[in-house]
Each structure stands twice: as structure tokens, then as C-alpha cells.
Image (cartoon, rainbow, N blue to C red):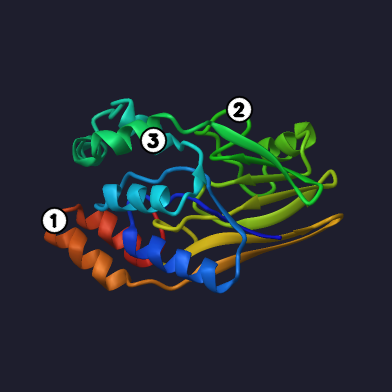
Amino acid sequence: MKVAFISDIHSNLEALKAVLKSIRENNTDRIYCLGDLVGYLNRPNEVVDTIRGEGIEAIIGNNDRDIVFEDFKGDEIKEWTYNTLTPENIRFLRNLPRDISLTIEGNRLKLVHGGLKSCREYLREGEENTLEALLSLEEDILIAAHTHIPYIDFYNNKMMVNCGSVGKPKFGSPYASYALLTLEEDHVVAEIVEVEYDVASTVASLREEGFPEELIEEIQRGKG
């Protein structure tokens, strides 16, 4: 079975559309979203509507949580996003679970946004808290996001996959990334897929709507 994992879309509709097209072309059986559907960019309703319309099972991310529970911390874009979201989409995001545990073809997976302890925890490649998480993991595979930097690693006979970011990557490329796992009994193949999308159109719409130039440069460079 082929399963795709996407995350950190951050209201970037053009990137999401390109990623979903790539996922379909890869004949994927299921899609899961690891949170942060909204925040930063300017198409929050369109992104949430797409996730809902596609029937993609999702969990809540730290930006989603801040926005829909009005914990803006002086962030004008978070407040703008809350005021832009429809009541239906706010309810949808508020009701998303913190994590998902599932079994596919005998493989046990744990899906989180940040870490096992918190959606704000960063599980970076090779760092001590990441190794501790894998040591304590009951499942076989941990799928996470939040860092916006994709990677695949192994420790203590466990697989760790960070699917990166659809809408705001930070690995030096402006293009989206997602994780694609082929799961069979006692055999798993994981890969990170990078997807080009219409960055110029996204940047133009951000400028037209008065979003910060610093944010726009981060989108263009794939850093920040």
C-alpha cells in the first residue's frame, strides 16, 4: 500500500494543488496531513476546503492551534487568518486530533505534528530528543513534521520520517515536499518527494495583498 504524508501547508494553495497532483500520479492509496494547514500565507479557507473536500485525515499543528484558539501572541498574520477563516473551517481545525496511531500491512505508525510530547517540539535529524523519542516509541514508524526540513532516519530498529513542508520549505529550495511510504508486511520503503509549483503566482498574490516582503523572500528562497 502506498501512503502519502503531507504537512505544513500554511495556506499555500498553489503548493497544495501541485502536491496532490503528484500524489495522484504516484497511484497513492491514502493521504494523511500532519497539521499546520494554515498560517503565514493568504489562502487559508481554500486550503482547508481542499483538505476537507479530499477527505484527508489530519491532525492539528501548532499554528492551527494558535489561530483557531485565538492565541495570536501579537502575530498579525495569525489574527488575519482567524478573521478570514469561515466558522465551519474554524470548527474543523479545532476538532482535529493531536496525533494518530494506525496499523498498515502489519506496520504500526505514529503520526504527530512536532514530537511525542508536544506539537511544538522539534524532532531534528540525529538530535538527542529525537533519539529519545524513538527509544520510547511503541510503534515501528514515527512520522513527524514541524521543522519544514524533510529527512528519513533509523534508530533502535525504528524508522523516523519527517515529511517536510508543502507550503513553506526551509531546506534551500522553494518547492514543496512530502513523504511517500510503500508499506508491505515486514517491508517498508520511504522516500521524500520534492514538487515544483507556481511560486511566482503565489508571490504575486502575497504582494498584491500586502503580505510582508520578508515572508515573500523566505517563500522564494526556501529558507527562514
Q: Which residue is drawn at 60% across and 27% down?
A: 117
First of labels 1, 3 by sequence position: 3
Q: Position of residue 154 (x, y in %)?
A: 77, 51
Q: Which residue is drawn at 78% across and 43% down?
A: 140
First of labels 2, 1 by sequence position: 2
**Residue 146 seen:** no
Report the residue marked by disc 2. 117
Q: Which residue is drawn at 77% across and 31% down?
A: 136
Dot 3: element: helix
**Residue 46 seen:** yes
Q: Which of marks 3 and 2 is in front?
A: 3
Q: Which residue is drawn at 78% across and 33% down?
A: 138
Dot 1: element: loop
What label sits on residue 93 in the rendered view?
A: 3
Q: How crowded is mark 1: few (under 14 residues within 10 Å), some or many (20 or more)?
A: few
Q: Do the residues labelled 3 and 2 touch (CB within 8 Å)?
A: no
Q: Report whether 60 appears left or right of 103.
A: left
Q: Position of residue 204 (x, y in %)?
A: 19, 67
In the image, 136 versus 109, the foreground residue is: 109
Q: What residue type is labelled 1?
A: Glu
Quadrant of the rendered image containing residue 201: bottom left
What label sits on residue 209 in the rendered view?
A: 1
Dot 2: element: loop
